[in-house]
Structures are given as structure tokens and as C-alpha cells.
Image (tube, grey):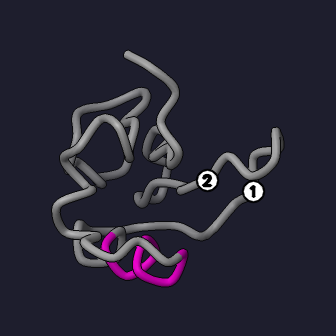
Amino acid sequence: MGCALFVVHGASRVGGRRVTVRDCGWDRVLGTAFSDHDLVVILEGAGVADAEAAVDDPAWVEWRDGRPHDFHAV
């Protein structure tokens, strides 16, 4: 897999997954998603035109440390 622009990190102990974006060589935290809807809203806020499609596109989003679309607490 190549470098995705957005990374959805593993779930926290209380649930939700941190979302970061690679920005000029730095990782910047955009927020925490507790659902696919939250993730779409975060991506839209970052300027992604078709955020719903980007969620499942590995060229845009990399899911780390857990299954995609699983936001439950670990």
C-alpha cells in the first residue's frame, strides 16, 4: 500500500479513532471519529470533495490497527 493522505488510527480505550492527515511532511490531528459519519464529516472539513467514497479508497485513507469501520473501544 502506498502512502495514504489520511490515516485512521486504532481505537482508543473509550472508543473512537484518531484521524490524522499528512501535511507537508508532518502528521496533523484532525479529530476523533466515533462512526463512519464522523469520519466523512472530518474528511469534508479537510476539503475532500467525495468524502464518502474516499473512506474506502486506500489512495485516500489508510486504516491502521484495526478493521475498517470499527470504532468500538479496545
Give the residue displayed 42% in from the left and 27% down from the top.
65
Query: Quadrant where the C terminus lies?
Result: top left
SS at mark 2? strand
Main secondary structure along the magenta-highlighted residues: helix
Which amino acid type is marked by label 1?
Arg
**CB within 8 Å, label 2 to label 1:** yes
Q: Is residue 66 left or right of residue 26?
A: left
Residues in magenta, as a range: 40-46
The span from disc 2 to disc 1 (Cα, nearest Å) is 5 Å
Say what amino acid the circle numbered 2 marks. Answer: Thr
Q: Position of residue 47 (x, y in %)?
A: 49, 78
Q: Position of residue 1 (x, y in %)?
A: 37, 16
Residue nearest the viewer, comparing 36 with 47 = 47
Residue 68 sits inside the magenta stretch: no
Question: Which residue is at a point 52% across and 27% down the rendered structure image?
Answer: 3
Q: Which residue is mark 1?
A: 28
Percent x, y of residue 20: 61, 53
